[in-house]
Amino acid sequence: MGKLEDIVSLCKRRGFIFPGSDVYGGMAGTWDFGPLGVMLKRNLMNAWWRFWVEQRDDMYGVDAVIIMNPKTWEASGHVATFADPLIECKECHGRFRADKLVDGATESITTEEFLQANPKCPTCGKQNWGEIKKFNMMFQTHVGPVEDDTSIAYLRPETAQGIFTNFKNVVDTIYPDMPFGIAQQGKAFRNEISPRDFILRDRECSQMEIEYFINPKNWEAEFEKMRTGQHVFLEEIIGLPESMIHELEVPAEDRAHYSKRTIDYMFDYPNGEEELMGLAYRTDFDLSNIQRASGKSMEYRDKVTGETYIPHVIEPSIGVERLFLAVLTAAYWEDGDRTVLRLSENLAPYKFCVSPLLKNKPELVNKAKEVYQQLKDKYTFVTWDDSGNIGKRYKKQDEIGTPKCVVIDFDTLEDDCVTVRDRDTTEQERVKISEL
Ligand code: GAP
């Protein structure tokens, strides 16, 4: 496992992640994915989509808008309750999340509890605090040319509501049997008081969420299936070590306003254990609220039994950036004087790097280009590197996680074999080009 600053530095040096608006000095809580970062990010999102949607018969996708009718956020409870406890230092006017300054505190911390602990201000070190205020984390905007109360809209703070509001559309067009799920991947926005730990807590992130609709009488069994399914995805598909993932049964007072049971999947990040994803039993909270607010029925009629009910929901929700950072944390490895990203083959941006031993020998370069094209046609994610010496090329490919480097030398011209060097063991073997 690497230190956070080592991972941040590698990400910038090798084009995985840059600070958002870097050229203007950045903007807190925003990050841009560079050429290699976007490849890894897509591989993660595609692996999730393949596993949870494409390989199952009971999951359907949607891609809803980010700016939804503001009634959505009134009905969902976000306007009233999607807030963090904000505290201001009266000396330096620094603003902080109160629960993050007191050991063991939760989001429901009161001013009295805070003042009893009386922590030092992280900026100026003084202990002169104001009152805790509830700070709503939704970003507001105005839709249309008039800026007044009637034009207020929000950037969605979760992708989930784009699923709930399409529940009836999916039922009426696809006629799915119960239980079934609707999945969505996309941007979510939160005006976090204290964005921190690189991409762990951002103001703009990407979520991957499923609302799995069930008959309420089966909720415990369905929750259990989803609970174990998350481990299969995180450990077998993504390759995170089981020992770095810890389930946390969230106590009632810490659960989101809509949840009757929540398990947080905590991960051993470089700065300690933090939430990677959550699994919540949202009951019929959302569909019932939508039914009330819209006046449209959200009931489902079972095709076999004729039973009619508002479905309940099990919701696994994971942030792409948190998954990205978990993958980098687990993959980062310092082996003597080399830094290696031990990414699994399905996630690595490039599967192969091809290079000629010497770049000033046309016969080697031509042969290497032939091999490069052959591998590119077969595997797509193949890179070319003829810069510097071979040691420097290996060092760079190790840092970006390329599992195999293929080198074309003078013997290749005679025997049609290449040297294949393994990223993790550094062992080299001769392999026939036709067997690559
Ligand atoms: N729809 C449920 C929901 O949004 P959440 O626990 O607030 O629940 C779900 O968020 C997941 O989204 C988190 O477990 C985390 O992976 C990711 N996430 C939430 N806020 C984030 C932020 N500010 N930065 C990065 N990821 C975030």
Image (cartoon, rainbow, N blue to C red):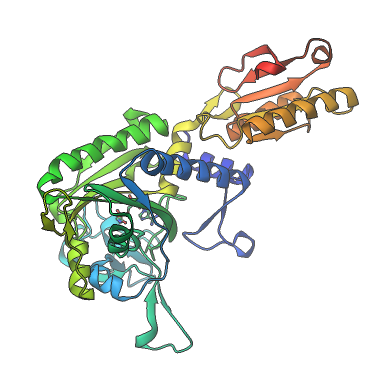
Residue 202 x, y percent position in the rendering = 43, 57
Q: Where is residue 200 shown, x and y percent of the image?
A: 41, 50
User: Is residue 410 positioned above or below 376 on the image?
Assistant: above
Write down the quadrant of residue 75 in the picture. Answer: bottom left
From the viewer's perspective, tell me whether residue 196 is left or right of residue 407.
Answer: left
Q: Is residue 167 left or right of residue 355?
A: left
Question: Left or right: 229 with respect to 184?
Answer: left
Q: Residue at x 68, y 33 (%)?
A: 376
Can residue 170 be seen by looking at this rendering? yes
Residue 395, compared with residue 105, is above or below; it is: above
What's the residue at 79%, 10% (across, down)? 415
Say which quarter of the image contains residue 245. Answer: top left
Comparing 307 with 406, the one in front is 307
Q: How many numbered discs, if any?
A: 0
Q: Residue at x 14, y 55 (%)?
A: 253
Quadrant in the picture for the N terminus? top left
Q: Is residue 329 above or below residue 313?
A: above
Image quarter of residue 64: bottom left
Q: Quadrant of ligand 1?
A: bottom left
Identify the image quadrant of the C terminus. Answer: top right
Q: Where does residue 179 sit, x and y in percent of width and height?
A: 22, 47
Determine the residue positioned at 50% across, 59% down. Answer: 30
**Residue 361 in view, yes or no:** no
On screen, residue 60 versus residue 168, left or right, reads: right
